[in-house]
Amino acid sequence: MERLNGKVALVTGGCRGIGQAIVRRFLSEGARVCVADYEKVDQAFSDALEGPVVFQADVRNREQIKLVCEQIVTKYGRIDILVNNAGIIRDKMLYKMSTSDWDDVLDVHLKGAFNCSQVVQQYMVQEGYGRIINLSSTSALGNRGQANYATAKAGIQGFTKTLALELGKYGITANAIAPGFIETDMTKQTAKRLGIDFETLVEASKAQIPVGRTGKGEDIANAAVFFAEESSSFVNGQVLYVAGGPKS
Ligand SMILES: NC(=O)c1ccc[n+]([C@@H]2O[C@H](COP(=O)([O-])OP(=O)(O)OC[C@H]3O[C@@H](n4cnc5c(N)ncnc54)[C@H](O)[C@@H]3O)[C@@H](O)[C@H]2O)c1
């Protein structure tokens, strides 16, 4: 049985990593999926999936996001699911962190989620239905070298709970997923910063994770389907840590 049959989804940053895993899973669950990604769209990815409509857009840019959403609504009539997934890291210890390291990270995660949610909610309110899923992180609890990112990911949790309060009466739920260590380009970048190879970082992380393994994009996609389902209508304003344990 397809759990998202006929639903229309927009996944930001869906061209690789966790976002791409969510796109693949949503397609397999019967959704019509659109992607807004900053990077130039990988045609091979788009062709291989035979399904997602991919737009090149920056979540920080309100006009670009408006245009993307208008095109989706013209094509499919509505947007049922928004996944605010686009993200970056600019890790540095506080004393080395530049203002642009701070601004870039807060802009992509917070202004990006604000832009996309505010544009999409008007269509969702019209339909009296919506599912907003935001990507937080275990780093929201604090993480060395990530003052900017931890702040953004904690902010995402407050943002999510507020959307849940404001939009619930319109049939719209807002929930967040807080992943632990997931093997993507983002964690490869972390290994580079630490000056170790990726396999070493994966092994070191595994030792800290109760289930004894690191996460994959599919683990997060699994949680995203749960929040995205129509039958999850009483699940609202929650943060689900998907990290292989209560701490990682
Ligand atoms: N990988 C992890 O361990 C992990 C853990 C916790 C949370 N997260 C969060 O999950 C989300 C996805 O992370 P990932 O590991 O797949 O990262 P990734 O770097 O592999 O992919 C991020 C995607 O976002 C896109 N993107 C970046 N800036 C953008 C912008 N301004 N506009 C549009 N698209 C933009 C990139 O082009 C890329 O396709 C992020 O929000 C990240 O913070 C990741």
Image: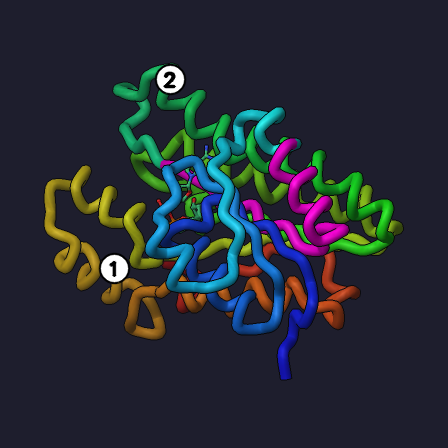
Q: Which of 156 and 28 is in front in this view?
A: 28
Marks 1/2: CA–CA distance: 29 Å
Q: Where is residue 17 drawn, in percent x and y?
A: 37, 54
Residue type, label 1: Ser
Q: Where is residue 172 drawn, in percent x and y?
A: 78, 53
Q: In which quarter of the image is the C terminus?
A: bottom left
Tell me what residue is drawn at x 50 percent, y 26 percent: 107
Residue picked out by circle 1: 205
Q: Assess whether mark 2 and mark 1 are in contact (beta carbons under 8 angstroms).
A: no
Q: Is residue 83 magenta?
A: yes
Q: Which residue lies furthest to the bottom in this view?
A: 1
Q: Residue 26, labelled with which disc?
A: none
Quarter where residue 31 is shown: bottom right
Tell me what residue is drawn at x 70 percent, y 35 percent: 119
**Crowd around label 1: few <14 · some 14–19 · many ≥20 (10 Å):** some
Residue picked out by circle 2: 100
Q: In which quarter of the image is the N terminus?
A: bottom right
Seen in the picture, residue 232 relative to 101 is either above or below; the reply is below
Q: Where is residue 184 drawn, in percent x and y?
A: 31, 54
Q: In the rendered structure, which segment of residues is drawn in magenta?
A: 67-88
Q: Does the residue labelled 1 lie within 8 Å of ligand 1?
A: no
